[in-house]
Amino acid sequence: MAQAALKIKLPPAPTWDLDSIFPGGSKSTQFEKFRLDVHKKLATANKQLKSLPTKISKQSVSKYVKFIELLQELWDDIELIGSFSNCLSSQDVKDTKADAIYSEALQYASEWQKLRAQLESLSLKISDKQWQMIAEHPELKITKFYLNELRDIAKSKMPIELESLTLDLAVNGYHAWNQLYDKMAAELIVDFEEDGKTTKLSLGQLHTKMGSPNRELRKQAFEKMTGAWKSREVLAGMALNYMGGFRLSVYKNRGWKSPLYEPLVMARMKQKTLDTMWAVIEKNINRLKPYIDAKKKLLGIDKFRWYDEFAPCANAERLFTFDEAGDFVVNNLKDFSPDLAKFCRMALDKRWIEAEDRPGKRGGGYCTGMGPRRQSRIFMTYAGTYENLLTLAHELGHAYHSWVLNDKPVFAQIYPMNLAETASIFTENFVTNAALAQARDKDEKMMLLDQKLQGAYVLFCDIYSRYLFDNAFYAERAKGIVGNERLNELMIESQKRAFGGLLDESGYHPLFWASKLHFFVTDAPFYNFPYTFGYLFATGVYQQAKKEGRAFADKYKALLSDTGSMTAEQVAKKHLGVDLTKEGFWQEAVNNALADIPLYVKLAESK
């Protein structure tokens, strides 16, 4: 995108409506009462738990039904406390009251997890036949998958006393490191020079500069970001080591041999599926080389570095106001699914989205549920670029996924992260291809193709480097503390393998382990491979939608509806008729993801 376009003054993007959830933010009296009620419900649940029998009859099964229903209600409520307080601290990093409430939510979550752990323990004392009387009870039958999964997982855990102690210790230890990292990242501010002026930028604002057509600005943004993290490198290294050490200690006591055991259980997928996916990707990474070579030619550079990855390569002087972006998403979804388009319009009109570009916000973007309110909220920083438009489409896809599941019991709404990426990337695909079809000229088409291929580049190379780093880090952390110098080395080694020579030797990012918050998320170990899985799985779903058109809309909705009640392999088999442990599906998805490279190269050669 041309530098001239970036100077266009756009109207401010909207802020979200949080007052309809609880008026008054972190000082809300309604929010305070809600939290007190949750505290009371937890006490009630503990009393109910003590009355649960270990022998089930037609009469006593109702006690389990009542307890499990309360457990679901509590999880919904706790999600609302955590999500709402996180929204408050995201929109204002100085809202220390919101930070304190988020810590309170973690405590409630720990109490809830202890209740769940005790239910797990009880489930092992009940015969298979009697447990099925609970799982197949008419009021719980829709949650049967979750309940049986709960019992299966219980077989691989420590005795209940140790599991409860672990959950207690995690609140003020394990999860506290995550909170410390988030706070540290949110407060990092840099001085940035542009057009003869020096302004203070948050890391979120700095990230948008990485998409500038001006290489010096991109380089400055990268160096400022790296410098900011260099000043916190020691603290980040401590946090990563202690979080990793906590996980490994728990795994050891549970008898879990691999650090991948937990993330795979959480993803509801097989190791063979994951290994097959990465094997296919690694065999195809070199197919990205013509795209990168064309990009280097267009940028007039001979060395492709980290800060060149998101550089625009076409003189497409187009920015979108937020309203234009929202209209674009809605209008290009309605031919496929009026229901999806209608939902997106509702989310936009009801101000479920925080998008204003201003200091004092956290970086990044996310979509979060609001528990019993059956709503979502989307957080992002909107600067008018096509990348921002894609982020909007992505997060609206997440919100729609949750909306589809709204009428189901809570335990049938909980879907794994790898399947969570299905709806978001599926929506992105629709919007990207619609934009390509409507491109006004060659430059705009090149810009859109570049955005599309960047997605493949990031999800095949960048995400793979994170996965490789996590594997290497946990292997070394099992032997002791991993020093910062070694962390940098592991990061570079992972990038060298994952990028397959696409990045110049001088272009790696050794401090990526410190700057990427995904390495520090305590409730999602290996917070990387689900993105690539979701990208390729969504690509497969999208290809099916292209073949069937609007007739696939209801099938798509049914697929999303099953994500809380099946394994990843089962969803793929039922709705797409494919076996995820075989290379065929993944190779076809990779082929589709890279299909636009020849056209991009051809357009680049004609410049």
Image (cartoon, rainbow, N blue to C red):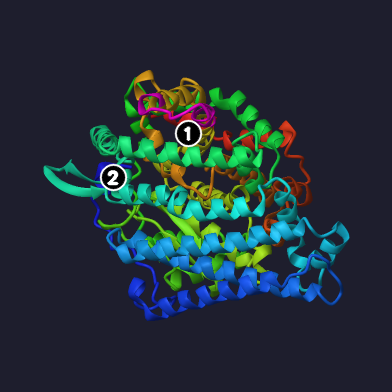
Residue sitting at x 40%, y 66%:
101
Task: State the image coordinates of residue 41 (x, y, percent, origin top left).
Answer: 57, 75
Name, please, the residue furthest toward the left. 196
**Judging from the image, what secondary structure is the residue with disc 1 in?**
helix
Residue 562 appears in which quarter of the rendering?
Answer: bottom right
Judge from the rendering whether residue 79 lies leftward or rightward of residue 257; answer left or right: left
What amino acid does circle 2 point to?
Answer: Leu
Q: What stretch is highlighted in magenta?
A: 471-486
Q: How many residues crowd around disc 2 within 10 Å: few (fewer than 14), some, or many (20 or more)?
A: many
Could you say where residue 69 lies in the image, as x and y percent from the top left? 68, 72
Q: Residues within 10 Å of mark 1 (few under 14, many from 20)?
A: some
Circle on res. 491: none
Q: Can residue 351 be seen in this view?
A: yes
Disc number placed over residue 462 in the picture, else none: 1
Residue 475, image x and y in percent? 54, 28
Q: Which of 241 and 604 is in front in this view?
A: 241
Secondary structure character of the magenta stretch overall: helix
Q: In this view, does 351 lie to the left or right of 596?
A: left
Q: Quadrant of the C terminus?
A: top left
Q: Give the labeled residue for mark 2.
A: 206
Identified at 32% across, 61% down, the residue is 356
Nearer the N terminus, badge 2 or badge 1? 2
Percent across and percent down for residue 542 are 64, 48
Drawn side of residue 282 relative to residue 186, left or right: right
Q: Is residue 352 magenta?
A: no
Kind of residue at disc 1:
Asp
Can residue 331 be spotted in the picture? no
Q: Residue 554 versus residue 315: which sits nearer the camera?
A: 554
- Disc 2, SS: helix
Q: In which quarter of the image is the N terminus?
A: top left
